Amino acid sequence: MARRLAAPLLLLAFHCTAWLSPDTPGPASRRKVLGGGVVATVATAPLAGAEELKSSWPAKDGVQFLRFYEDQYDAERDDTRRTPQFIQAIQERVKSRPGLTVLDIGTGPFALFALVAARAGAKKVYAVEGNPEAAERARNTIAEQEDVPEGVIEVIEGFSTAVTLPEKVDLVCAEVVGAFATQENIVATMQDAQKRHMKDANNPQNYIPSVIQTWTAPVSYALHPVLAPPKFEKLQGQPLTLNPRDRTLELISDPQVLEEINFAKPLPEGKQSKSLSFKISRDRLRSNYDAYYEALTTKEEVKSEDAKPLAIQTTKSFSGMAIWPRLILDPEAKILVESRGPNGEHQKSHWPTLLSLMSPFPVPVEPEDTLSITETSELSKDILVPVKYSFQGTLNSGSDASAE
């Protein structure tokens, strides 16, 4: 396919919180961008072949627990689409099994889930935390709780893969899930826990969460032209980190499950690959156009005759793959944690949405085009070795298929 985006694309900046690159100045205000008449000319070179739709990067979140991030801990605790669901799952599981012993991996400074388990009646809770400052804060937090008997919760400083518990436990609670669900090396963490810390690793009732998933979908991204070369190369393949409510990113096809890890089943090891096929949705493009056009004409006060072609160009473009997690906390799949809506809708979450750009410039698309994607993950057995991810893709014209 050799279609091109030929016209300049006005840079939209509404509701944007994208990470760009370390040496990129902070994002300009939308008034400055739009009022100053700044435009970005989208590349006119045709899409040459499959090798041009690709991305690869090592995960960085796998080692970020070595540092203490106050704001991140606060955001996790205050996430109303995460914390209440975990509390419910822990309470139901512990209350249904008197005398339970629990391992809370990554307890954090608030020891939140460890305290929930103790108050629900757990016999013993081992709260493991690899960050020294967070571990000390957790001890102080627990000591201040008058309704939790002394000794029920034991804080153990260190990585769960490096410590030895006084006993094996019945239940493991491990919320070490990234935006790409496996990027914090939860697979290696759980493999070790199964071998050394758990009484029965085959029982699905012994895990919270029970299943973790990574979802993905192709998207248009209104600020992609800002990242044209040489800025594109400065990203070094790292995905953008976007607020899940950021309306500069819109799905152009229905989302699909990219990876699914069920902890009661054999866990993946080494290199894993999965191929998916996405059809560009006419309904989604129409809805995206309406959203872009409204933002331009109402929030940015762009004239209608100028807004229409700009909204069309943004709508009919492919920038890369959006990535976000979904957690299933119980074996019955009744308690879910959604970082985006079930169909990829924008919503508030402490988890960002990752955007892996697969081309230096937006690639033009039309309804019924088909995008074929193969994602490869290289999982590590060492939690300090980053997981590596890559995407390869081809875009086939829907008109070409219909002509056949």
Image: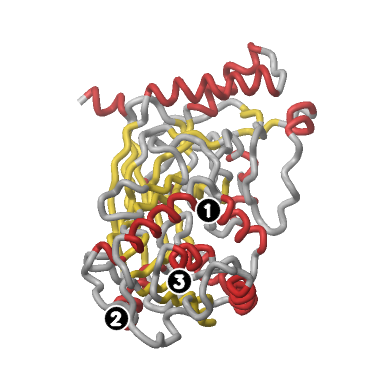
Q: Quadrant of residue 375?
A: bottom left
The residue at 23%/23% (across/down) is 403
Which disc, if any, is residue 172?
A: none
Residue 235 lies in what quarter of the image?
A: bottom right
Label 3 neighbourhood size at 10 Å, few (<14), some (14-19), many (20+)?
A: many
Q: Earlier in the sequence, mark 3 or mark 2?
A: 3
Disc 2: which residue? 195
| Disc 1 packing (10 Å; few <14; some 14–19; many ≥20) | many
Frontmost residue, 163 versus 99: 99
- Tell me the quarter of the image containing the N terminus: top left
- Element under disc 2: helix
Q: Is residue 107 visible?
A: yes
Q: CA distance from mark 1 to mark 3?
A: 27 Å
**Secondary structure state at the residue bearing disc 3:** strand
Up-down relation of residue 118 to residue 233 (above or below):
below
The type of colouring in the image is secondary structure
Residue hosting label 3: 105
Tell which tag, 1 or 3, sits nearer the viewer. Answer: 3
Residue toward you, 324 or 195: 195
Read off the residue under disc 1: 239
Label 1's element?
loop
